Image (cartoon, grey):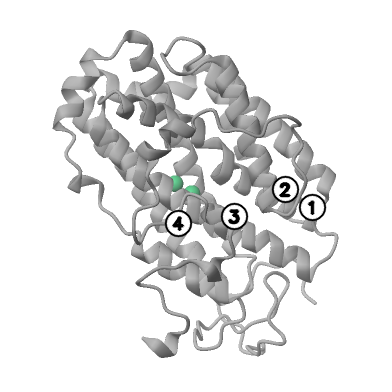
């Protein structure tokens, strides 16, 4: 068996493409995309869902958002700008880092969907450019991109994520790779969502409706990334018992939740109608419990069983026909009932 530290070869003529030999990490495939011969069927289903989600930011009209923006309260505007700054960082680092993860995944069907994820993260990055250019006054635009330079809380958060990713590149090992996958899962599954809810809250008051439309599409993509990492982690654990240390997962979850709450209090606090430090804590801990459950683990926050933003679900509306369902991450991928999905490539 290969070690995870071995970056997969671009072409590995002596490898084996049989399903018996295939492993999600540490495998020895030729790295030819023979997609008639797929071991991880969930990856095929997910490919269909992700491709079906394709969207273009410019198709969403942001004209009325420009007027809404100047009529936001100062606190709402600060939150809007700050959340955008953090989202820009998250999508930048994912666009850069997902290929590093893929270099160590040895199942072509999974490499394929990681490529789709990378391109989706690139679309997200570009959508922020479109939002900023359409809505924000010229003198403010670079401030959004550069906010981490002056905002210590934002800088520390960004640095923390980047260091976990960088550690694997600098010192590749099973342990550092496991940490990257957990951090990826936390980023996709926890970090975005207090920010998303802020935009849905504005939409519930008929404000910044175009921005919310874009956020909803990003949200839909992110949920497919949550599922991607969930399945990848479960398969790795299945094939490599003991690869993940449950204690480490819990401690990284705790750190992520603490940072998410601190950041949200820093950027929103009790200053925006509909969000309080209590709802932020309740939401983040509830979400972490849900995400742990989806990994087959026990929740770590006792008593946090309720989503305080349930009333915003209809503004999130990622459940439209043909869309990723909001509870997508709770089911098995094969159960997704997509009119456009197919069970096998033979049906195409
Ligand atoms: Fe993204
Ligand atoms: Fe993502």
> Quick one: quadrant of the C terminus?
bottom left
User: How far is disc 1 from disc 2 in space, using C-alphas?
Assistant: 6 Å
Answer yes or no: disc 4 within 8 Å of ligand 2. no
Position of 41 relative to 154 (above/below):
below
Q: CA gap, disc 4 to disc 1?
A: 24 Å
Instruction: Give the mark toward the camera: 3 or 4.
Output: 3
Q: How crowded is mark 1: few (under 14 residues within 10 Å), some or many (20 or more)?
A: some
Cα distance, mark 3 to mark 2? 22 Å
CB under 8 Å between discs 4 and 1 = no
- Which residue in the protein does label 4 denote? 118
Instruction: Please state if 267 lies on the left or on the right of 186 as rendered.
Output: left
Return the residue at label 2. Answer: 179
Query: What residue does disc 3 label?
Result: 330
Instruction: Assess whether mark 2 and mark 1 are in contact (beta carbons under 8 angstroms).
Output: yes
Element at badge 2? helix
Residue 264 numbered mark, or none: none
Instruction: Say whether disc 3 or disc 1 marks the residue closer to the N-terminus.
Output: 1
Task: Give whichever of discs 3 and 4 has the lower sequence position.
Answer: 4
Front of the two marks 3 and 1:
3
Residue 160: name its quadrant.
top right
- Marks 3, 2: nearer the viewer: 3
- Mark 3–mark 4 CB contact (< 8 Å): no
**Secondary-structure class at tag 4:** helix
> Quadrant of residue 255 in the image?
top right
The label number, if any, that marks residue 175 in the structure image:
1
Q: Where is residue 99 in the image (x, y as percent from the top left)?
A: 53, 59
The mark that comes first in sequence, 4 or 1, is: 4
Residue 177 showing in the rendered view: yes
How far apart marks 4 and 2 lie (CA) works out to: 19 Å
The structure residue drawn at horizontal position 41% and vertical position 50%, both measured from the top left corner, is 220
239 to 313, vertically: above or below: below
Of 143 and 214, the residue lying toward us? 214
């Amino acid at each position: 068996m290969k070690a995870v530290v071995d970056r997969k070869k671009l072409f590995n003529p002596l490898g084996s493409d049989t399903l018996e030999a295939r492993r999600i990490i540490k495998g020895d495939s030729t790295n030819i995309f023979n997609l008639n011969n797929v071991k991880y069927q969930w990856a095929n289903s997910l490919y269909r869902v992700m491709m079906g989600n394709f969207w273009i930011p410019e198709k969403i009209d942001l004209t009325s958002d420009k007027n809404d923006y100047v009529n936001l309260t100062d606190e709402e505007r600060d939150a809007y700008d700050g959340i955008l700054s953090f989202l820009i960082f998250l999508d930048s680092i994912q666009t850069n880092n997902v290929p590093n993860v893929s270099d160590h995944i040895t199942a072509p069907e999974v490499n394929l969907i990681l490529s789709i994820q990378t391109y989706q993260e690139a679309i997200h990055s570009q959508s922020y450019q479109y939002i900023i250019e359409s809505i924000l006054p010229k003198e403010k635009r670079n401030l959004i991109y550069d906010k981490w330079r002056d905002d210590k809380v934002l800088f520390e958060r960004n640095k923390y994520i980047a260091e976990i990713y960088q550690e694997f590149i600098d010192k590749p090992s099973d342990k550092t790779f496991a940490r990257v996958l957990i951090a990826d899962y936390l980023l996709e599954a926890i970090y975005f969502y207090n920010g998303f809810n802020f935009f849905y809250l504005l939409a519930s008051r008929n404000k910044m409706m175009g921005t919310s439309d874009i956020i909803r599409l990003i949200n839909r993509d992110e949920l497919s990334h949550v599922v991607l990492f969930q399945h990848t982690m479960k398969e790795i654990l299945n094939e490599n018992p003991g690869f993940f240390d449950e204690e480490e997962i819990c401690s990284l979850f705790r750190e992520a939740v603490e940072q998410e709450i601190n950041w949200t209090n820093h950027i929103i606090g009790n200053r925006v109608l509909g969000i309080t430090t209590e709802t932020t804590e309740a939401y983040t801990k509830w979400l972490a419990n849900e995400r742990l459950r989806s990994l087959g683990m026990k929740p770590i926050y006792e008593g946090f069983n309720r989503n305080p933003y349930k009333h915003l679900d209809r503004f999130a509306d990622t459940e439209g026909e043909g869309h990723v369902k909001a509870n997508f991450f709770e089911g098995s991928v094969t159960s997704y009932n997509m009119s456009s999905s197919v069970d096998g490539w033979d049906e195409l």
